[in-house]
Image (spheres, rainbow, N blue to C red):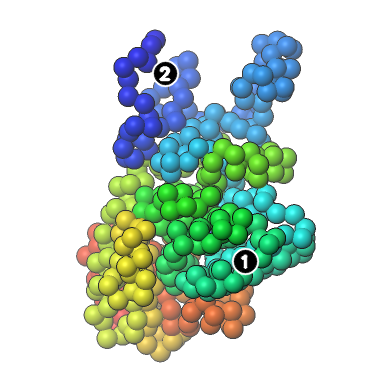
Amino acid sequence: MSDHGKLRPETFRPATQLVHGGTRRSQFAELSEAMFLTQGYVYDTAEAAEARFKGTDPGFIYSRFSNPTTAMFEDRIALLEGAESARATATGMAGITAALLGQVKAGDHVVAAKALFGSCRYVVEELLPRFGVASTLVDGYDLDQWRKAMRPNTKTCFLESPTNPTLDVYDIAGVAKIAHDGGATLVVDNAFASPILQRPLELGADCVVYSATKHIDGQGRVLAGVILASEEFIQTHVHNLLRQTGPSISPFNAWIMLKGLETLPVRVAAQQASAAKIADFLAEQPGVTRVIYPGRADHPQHELAKRQMKGGGTMICFEVKDSKAGAFRLSNALSIIKISNNLGDAKSIITHPATTTHQRLAPEARAEMGITDGMLRLSAGLEDVDDLIADLGNALKAV
Ligand SMILES: *Cc1c(COP(=O)(O)O)cnc(C)c1O
């Protein structure tokens, strides 16, 4: 059947791409995308197998390398991101580790912002140096520090924005320029903003990585990651590393993520609208000493957030009176909002970073990142926002 005259997926608007992009139907013409739980593939002839392995026939070989369901997920998210190429991984950390490790060798240097997801900080601060890759950590909001940290052997710069958990917003275009002027690349961990609210490649980043575990699944079911970049970046730095070392996503998990993409724009928009309302509510409460939300005019980088994000995001950070004791009393008094550490989830979630996600860090490192004992991170879910506000209002009485 000819496709003549049909619209091409690249011309679709994002919501349409997320429903139809990347779909490959089997001979049964199923409506919903098929889940190919298969380790390998059958070849009609020995010659066909030879051609497949030689790369002269582009079909699938082995699910550590690629899989039809995984490929649908990769193609769909690549369309949304405007990236030439994508590789799904077992977890967000597998994606980050591969994106960084794939670019460096002993003797190289990496610059990263101090405020990183705990495991990312481990990779930059402890793992890379063990293999002779030096790293410098800078205050991500200070472009001068990025500039001064660059060395002739700096291969890549790495940041997340907004940061976890303090929601600092960093100038992605500014850091990309510094990296490129120094002959390095910029990798952005875009988990907090999601691909709906921020497009780092358009701002000059060379590679974007997601913990798909967060907004892309959005229902706390499985783990996954994805690396997006130009075809050249993927082929040069990532393709072989992933194939040969095997941090591959399960096709089942890829299917969950593929279906998660269909509803991503609707979910993120609803969660962001709730987060904005909750942030304004919290700012009025006597038990709350500080609210950090990039969508509020009192956020230190509000103007930058307005420039590089579509809205303030789905996450709120706030501080309560009486430090850790106050934060614990509030958390324990909540009933709808759950104490957990996922984010971007349909369920609203509260986290006390100092004693959970960032517990492993030395107190000085936490202080450096601005993580205080009274600080709570709230991920707005899909519940009715008035119920969430009532839950918080009630729990604040315990503070
Ligand atoms: C969760 C998270 C990761 C790690 O992702 P996993 O899927 O848990 O491996 C990395 N960066 C950020 C900002 C995250 O929130």
Q: Residue at x 66, y 11 (%)?
A: 44
Q: Earlier in the sequence, mark 1 or mark 2?
A: 2
In the displayed structure, 84 sits above or below 337; it is above
Disc 1 crowd, CA 10 A, few/some/many (<14, 14-19, 20+): many
Q: Is 24 on the left-hand or right-hand side of 390?
A: right
Percent of width and height locating residue 284: 24, 80
Whether residue 11 is situated above or below residue 103 in the rendered picture: above
Instruction: State the quadrant of the N terminus.
Output: top left
Looking at the rendered structure, the secondary structure element under dot 2 is loop
Q: Is residue 241 visible?
A: yes
Q: Residue at x 54, y 49 (%)?
A: 207
Q: Position of residue 309 (x, y in %)?
A: 35, 58
Q: Which mark is residue 230?
A: none
**Real-space CA distance between mark 1 and mark 2, rounded to the nearest whole angstrom:** 53 Å
Q: Which residue is mark 1?
A: 150
Q: Secondary structure at mark 1?
A: loop
The kind of residue on which mark 2 rests is: Ala
Q: Quadrant of the C terminus?
A: bottom left
Q: Which residue is mark 2?
A: 29
Q: Nearer the viewer, mark 1 or mark 2?
A: 1
In the picture as drawn, the residue positioned furthest to the front comes out as: 181
**Labelled pair 1, 2 in contact (Cβ < 8 Å):** no
Image location of residue 87, percent across then percent down: 57, 41
Q: Amino acid at mark 1?
A: Met
Q: Position of residue 142 (x, y in %)?
A: 49, 73
Judge by depth and name the residue closer to the eye, 265 or 39: 265
